[in-house]
Amino acid sequence: MRNLLTKTTDLAMYLTLAYIRKGDYVIDATCGNGGDTAALAEAVGQEGAVLAVDIQKAAVESTAKRLTEIGMNNVTIVQDSFCRMEQISEEYFPGKSPAAVVFNLGYLPGGNKQVTTTAEDTETAVRRAADLIRKDGVVTVVMYDGHGEGAREKEQLLAMAGRLPKDRYHVVFASMPNQQTGRPPEVLWITRKK
């Protein structure tokens, strides 16, 4: 088994996968270059389904290419805003509640760093995801506060998460305070109680 703390994103995905079983339906709300999408597709297996969403054409194309290269065909990729996640989910997977919704915020790796997720849209999408997941499901949000909008996102998301009703949700926030170089990502998990 690999060292789970090699990267914060590895830890985020490892814990997310604990909520997913073969045959589940899950959403990658920011498919980026397809890394999380591929991990989710493998976790749900061919009997499961993944909805991968990204607003950027380059991200959708990169994810499609990656999935083709590894032979994954249980993913529906949609170029759209994650703010429309409920409508997109209902269009492609009517009546299904996802076991997990994954957000990896910021900008597209290798893409234009001026194009980022925004605090207002992200808060809206994460709140909707928390309502959309099934009971015992999880929303995973990897946050990067090393740029201006990322810092605003983190502040707004932590405030929103702190207001979620404790009788319906558990909220966990993790950071890596011993990382001296750069600004390592931090992770927010929201689980819906049974």
Image (cartoon, grey):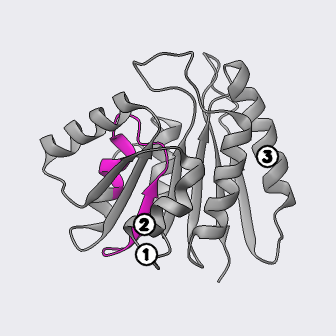
Q: Residue at x 56, y 71 (%)?
A: 137
Please, is residue 83 above or below residue 150 in the view?
A: below
Query: Dot 3 corresponds to which residue?
Result: 158
Would you say residue 1 is visible in this rendering? Answer: no
Which quadrant of the figure contains the C terminus?
Answer: bottom right
Along the line of sight, the residue nearer the viewer: 181 or 124: 124
Residue that label 1 marks: 94
Nearer to us of marks 3 and 2 is 2
Query: In the rendered structure, which segment of residues is drawn in magenta?
Result: 20-40
The outermost residue toward the bottom is 194
Q: Where residue 133 sits: x, y (%)?
A: 57, 70
Location of residue 181 in the rendering, given as x and y in whole percent from the top left corner: 60, 16
Query: Residues under labels 1 and 3: Cα distance?
Result: 30 Å
Q: Distance between the residues labelled 2 and 1?
A: 6 Å
Nearer to us in this view, 37 or 112:
112
Marks 2 and 1 in Cβ contact (< 8 Å): yes
Query: For residue 109, what is the image quadrant?
Result: top left
Left or right of 51: which side holds 99?
A: right
**Numbered disc 2: secondary structure:** helix
* Residue 32 forms part of the magenta stretch: yes
Q: What residue type is labelled 2?
A: Glu
149 sits to left or right of 106? right
CB atoms of marks 3 and 2 within 8 Å = no
Residue type at numbered disc 3: Leu
